[in-house]
Image (cartoon, rainbow, N blue to C red):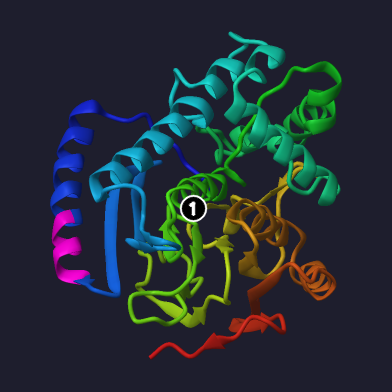
Amino acid sequence: MYKYFALHTFMMKILRYFTAIALLSSLIMSCTPRNRYISITGYAQGGTYTVKLNLNGNDGNVAATPVEIRDSIDAILQRIDSTLSGYNRNSLLSRFNAGDITYKESMKNSMFSDINQQAVKIFNETEGVVDVAAGPLFDLWGFGFRSGEFPSDEEVMKTKESCGMELLLAHETGKLNYNAIAQGYSCDLVASYLYSIGVKDMMVDIGEIFCDGVNPSGQAWSLGIDRPVDGNNELGAEIQGIFRAPEGPHGIVTSGNYRKFYIKDGKKYAHSIDPRTGYPVTHNMLSATIVAEDALTADAYATYCMVVGLEESIQLLQKREDLEGCLIYDEEGIFKTWCSEGFVLEEAK
């Protein structure tokens, strides 16, 4: 899921300094006549981002220098923070959620309007399973923008009845939480910029993934699928398998219930909340990795799968030709994997 944090000016200066060094070192090490890959890293959304790209673009060299590319990526991510972050108290989203700005005023912002339109589309497609206007429910359970406590059934029902996309659209009031789609959306915006300057081969990693073309070895981009063990908070520490991205542009997103949860009275409560019931899910799905044509869609449907569980997720992936997926679940204490026809998971070495 998605987390934004307000950017700290001093830390950003330090990180940008080391980013420039890393970028320059990467450029020097990888430049050959046909292979001019660079790796740009920086700080965004409570963690780091990495963008790998080939400076040999569609029609020769891309139309920007490495430093210009880095600065443009940082500018995109800072705009996302100031617009859509629920952790930045001065962001447009925070101001809307606090009632300081109206829905109509918020929609005048092109980024806010764009992601909201896509969120409405996803809400309708998933029949309410992915609902960005159910933010108060996530706050109530302690998985949103505030620290919540274990709520009573009465509190859950009261909160459920007072939020949701249908109420937002009907009355233009409510509270939003874009965590289910914002990281994917961020990847898509960065990728769109890279396409605009002529980049063909790229991997954008902002917690979620967007990739196109090939890696520096001329092969498909490969990604490790984390083993969904409770407490496995280090990316790549334990790998369930390796996935090689198919040809063309794709978003690849994993959602799981093994990093954000708490235990009360011996029972696990995970961050996947079903907006239709108001409660955390209790099924045996551990993680869902979804591949789609863009990262926002992959992000949304990874969330969808984690809400509806194994059987409905399998039905979805068998029906949708535009989606592929890998579902990891627990069966009597044993990890098992189901993959759609187009998702080949190689054994981790």
Side of 285 where 91 appears, left or right: left
> Residue 288 location in percent, x, y?
62, 67
Above or below, 267 against 273 in this view is below
| Nearer to the camera, 58 or 233 | 58
Side of 316 where 116 appears, left or right: left
* Residue ID at (56%, 61%): 253
> Residue 145 location in percent, x, y?
52, 32
Q: Which residues are magenta?
A: 24-30
Q: Quadrant of residue 7?
A: top left
Secondary structure at badge 1 equals helix
Residue bearing the label numbered 1: 195
Residue extending furthest toward the front: 59
Above or below, 73 against 198 in this view is above
How many other residues sit within 10 Å of disc 1, few (<14), some (14-19) or many (≥20)?
Answer: some
Residue extending furthest toward the top: 100
> Residue 1 location in percent, x, y?
54, 50
Quarter of the image with the C terminus is: bottom left
